[in-house]
Amino acid sequence: MSTDYGRGTSHSLIKDERGVILVEFAFCFIILMVLFLGTVTLSFAFRDYVSLQKVVREGAREAVITGNTGTAYSKACQAAWLWGLKPENLSISFQQGADGARTVEKCYGTYHINLFNYTFPTLVGQASLSDININSAADFGWWDFTKKSP
């Protein structure tokens, strides 16, 4: 009666192990590349989000200073160009509110992001695989002490 339970049979199934490391590397490399490119794509989306925040802050600030939303819109578009946002993907709107002696200018921005166009522009043929909209808003206000509060 033998108690080795097939000892040696596993070695007889795989006689040549020369290509195993290359196959394992190929599988790991694919997984690492997907993680790397996903991280790069998300970093581009985060960059666009931070840029949009700066654009709406600039628009709201200009609306408060000049009191003119047309001028504020053009200043926000200039800031979008400065921060690398595409004007055709950007929409900006303004809203003014008042509460007694306090006046607030609100600037809202929406930016349409084409994911994977930064990392795979020729692969996807300039059409994105997944589109998302990011939104941001900024409020700037001032107190007019010449007015009396109710």
Image (cartoon, rainbow, N blue to C red):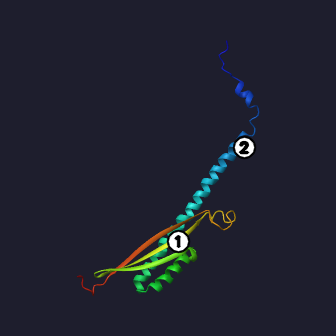
Cα distance between the residues tagged 1 and 2: 44 Å
Residue, disc 1: 111
The image position of residue 84, as x and y in percent, is 57, 73
If the image is split into quadrants, where does the C terminus sit? Answer: bottom left
Q: Which residue occupies 68% across, 66% down?
A: 125
Residue, disc 2: 22
Hey, what amino acid is under mark 2? Leu
Question: Tag 2's secondary structure?
Answer: helix
Question: Tag 1's secondary structure?
Answer: strand
The image position of residue 58, as x and y in percent, is 46, 78
Hey, what amino acid is under mark 1? Tyr
Instruction: Sort mark 1 into few (<14), some (14-19) or many (20+) by Cα contacts within 10 Å.
Output: many
If the image is split into quadrants, where does the N terminus sit? Answer: top right
Q: Quadrant of residue 87?
A: bottom right
The image position of residue 123, as x and y in percent, is 69, 62
- Residue 62, numbered label: none
Q: Which residue occupies 72% across, 28% down?
A: 11
